[in-house]
């Protein structure tokens, strides 16, 4: 991270030339990003495999397709998004042009996390480009292969003056944040997010925070347990549980738990075979440090491992694991797990489960599984979370038509599809006054009379 100040000054100079403003420039850059994705698929899959031993299918849908779809969505809609948005007027402004103009902020900083290292840099970048900004990209240093690939490919496909990748760790990023940016888009942990906010406060920089938290999964009432277990296992163990929207823990009754456990075993066996360690569709924990942390949690938990529990340090492998007899004081319930470990907590009633969820920080996602519409509606209406998905997991974040983001401690702001464009745009309130009807306009001038005007 050499000469950060010079790099940022270069981006600012490029922004001030106005080069990023025309629709044609933005479309050219978005098409460049699409070409990057299409011409380097093998290298991308290889980098993700080296970083996380990401299974090819998981990498294809969660890192490549999702980005490609979002780019195409932006290319197809950008002209409309950029149009002035005309708004209603009142008597005093009836003959004026009143509209919202979307303007780029300027130079934005995008900081990514390691679990979806390509997606978490490129999805925000789509909106930053679409909105007409210049951008400095800071991928996670933990997913080294993807970081290096982004640093190599971005300058080959995008304007070098307007989009720059900078590599480095926590200390480099801390120094980077001493500079003024016009918007900071951060994905990562709540602890680091506090530091980002403090650094942003110095320059009064607006911030989007995409964070994590403990995503609850409520399973209640009548249910097709086999299908529920398949969907749950897929959502939980995708990317070895290292997803910000992975189900973090299950809340269900003892009876449901008794029916759920064999269904989970069956789904795991069907997906990964008798020994998941040998299955190419099971990813790995990102680093030794993260592996040690997860094993420490598992070792200190008072819960009983009833499925999985096997591990191998050399391979950074942890088997898909389920624990029962976990209560709210357990170490697994104190922070986001972010690995292939799933505790089950039992409750007596749906109300108890809802009270449990509402007594904690607002999660990034909330899942409910039930064949009873009334159960789904009750949970939907009596809880709060960044996103919500009934009878499945993760899927709500795959649509570019739905906003993705947290609430409370799970984040602020949102993105995906048009929402990313909006996140990186200032909404400028514009009123172009006409010269007519001055007789009515003049009613507001002093000396004031007691006559009330109805605006
Ligand atoms: P992290 O906070 O450790 O790192 C994220 C980024 O912050 C990296 O680029 C890193 O270099 C930088 N960073 C680290 N320490 C820093 C410091 N002291 N000052 C400035 N920058 C610093 O997060 P992580 O471990 O990479 O990610 C895991 C977390 O991210 C989980 O909580 C997960 O739920 C969350 N997450 C959220 C989303 C989402 O979209 N909401 C997506 C993925 C991950």
Image (tube, helix red, strand yellow):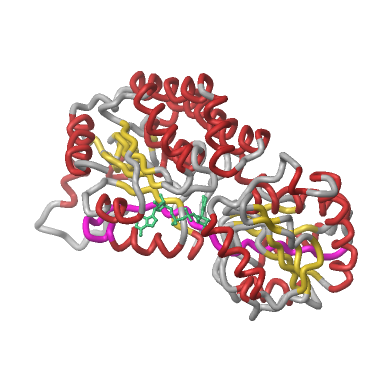
Q: Which of 399 and 209 is in front in this view?
A: 209
Relative to 413, residue 450 above or below: below
Residue at horizontal 50 percent and vertical 28 percent from the top: 71
Q: In terms of depth relative to the viewer, which is nearer, 426 or 90? A: 426
Quarter assignment of residue 100 = top left
Indicate left or right for 101 with 179 as reference. right
Q: Please tell me whether residue 267 belongs to the stretch shown in magenta.
A: no
In this picture, residue 352 sits left or right of residue 9: right
Q: Tell me where residue 2 sits by quadrant.
A: top left
Furthest residue in direction bottom, as rendered:
329
Instruction: Based on the picture, tell me whether residue 200 belongs to the magenta stretch.
Output: yes
Estimate the x, y position of residue 346 in percent, counting from the top left. 78, 74
Give the answer, above or below, for where 385 lies relative to 157. Answer: below
Residue 159: x %, y % from top left: 31, 24
Q: Position of residue 145 (x, y in %)?
A: 47, 38
Q: Which residue is situated farthest in the front direction here?
A: 314
Report the front residue among 46 and 165.
46
Give the residue drawn at x 37%, y 43%. 138
Number of marks present in the image shown: 0
Quarter of the view holding residue 218: bottom right
- Residue segment shown in magenta: 199-221
Left or right? Give the position of 220 relative to 283: right
Q: Position of residue 261 (x, y in %)?
A: 85, 62
Considering every residue shown, the one lying at the far left of the view is: 447
Q: Which of 391 and 448 is in front in this view?
A: 391
Relative to 43, 184 lies left or right: left
Q: Which residue is drawn at 42% across and 33% down?
A: 150
Quadrant position of the N terminus in the picture:
top left
**At 29% across and 51% down in the image, what residue appears?**
172
């Amino acid at each position: 991270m050499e000469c950060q100040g010079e790099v940022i000054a270069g981006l600012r100079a490029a922004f001030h030339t106005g080069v990023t403003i025309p629709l044609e420039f933005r479309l050219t850059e978005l098409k460049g990003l699409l070409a990057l994705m299409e011409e380097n698929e093998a290298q991308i899959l290889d980098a993700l495999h080296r970083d996380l031993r990401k299974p090819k299918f998981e990498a294809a849908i969660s890192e490549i397709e999702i980005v490609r779809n979002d780019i195409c969505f932006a290319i197809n809609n950008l002209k409309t998004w950029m149009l002035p948005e005309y708004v209603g007027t009142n008597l005093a402004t009836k003959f004026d042009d009143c509209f919202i103009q979307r303007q780029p902020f300027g130079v934005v900083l995008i900081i990514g996390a390691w679990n979806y290292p390509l997606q978490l840099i490129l999805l925000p970048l789509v909106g930053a480009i679409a909105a007409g900004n210049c951008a400095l990209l800071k991928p996670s240093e933990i997913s080294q292969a993807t970081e290096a690939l982004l640093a190599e490919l971005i300058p080959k496909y995008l304007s070098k003056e307007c989009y720059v990748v900078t590599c480095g760790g926590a200390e480099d990023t801390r120094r980077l944040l001493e500079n003024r940016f016009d918007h900071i888009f951060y994905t990562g942990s709540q602890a680091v997010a506090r530091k980002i906010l403090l650094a942003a406060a110095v320059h009064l920089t607006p911030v989007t925070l995409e964070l994590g938290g403990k995503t609850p999964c409520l399973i209640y009432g009548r249910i097709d347990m086999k299908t529920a277990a398949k969907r749950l296992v897929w959502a939980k163990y995708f990317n070895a549980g290292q997803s910000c929207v992975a189900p973090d823990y299950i809340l269900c009754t003892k009876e449901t738990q008794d029916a759920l456990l064999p269904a989970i075993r069956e789904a795991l066996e069907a997906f990964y075979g008798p020994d998941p360690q040998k299955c190419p569709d099971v990813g790995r924990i990102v680093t030794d440090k993260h592996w040690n942390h997860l094993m420490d949690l598992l070792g200190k938990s008072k819960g009983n491992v009833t499925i999985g529990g096997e591990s191998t340090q050399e391979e950074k492998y942890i088997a898909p694991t389920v624990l029962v007899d976990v209560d709210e004081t357990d170490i697994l319930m104190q922070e986001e797990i972010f690995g292939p470990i799933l505790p089950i907590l039992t409750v007596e009633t749906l109300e108890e489960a809802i009270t449990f969820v509402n007594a904690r920080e607002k999660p990034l996602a909330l899942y409910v599984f039930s064949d009873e519409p009334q159960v789904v509606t009750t949970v939907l209406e009596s809880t709060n979370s960044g996103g919500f998905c009934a009878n499945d997991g993760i899927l709500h974040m795959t649509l570019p038509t739905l906003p993705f983001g947290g609430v409370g401690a799970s984040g602020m702001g949102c993105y995906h599809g048009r929402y990313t464009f909006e996140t990186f745009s200032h909404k400028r309130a514009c009123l172009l006054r006409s010269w007519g009807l001055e007789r009515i306009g003049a009613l507001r001038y002093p000396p004031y009379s007691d006559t009330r005007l109805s605006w």
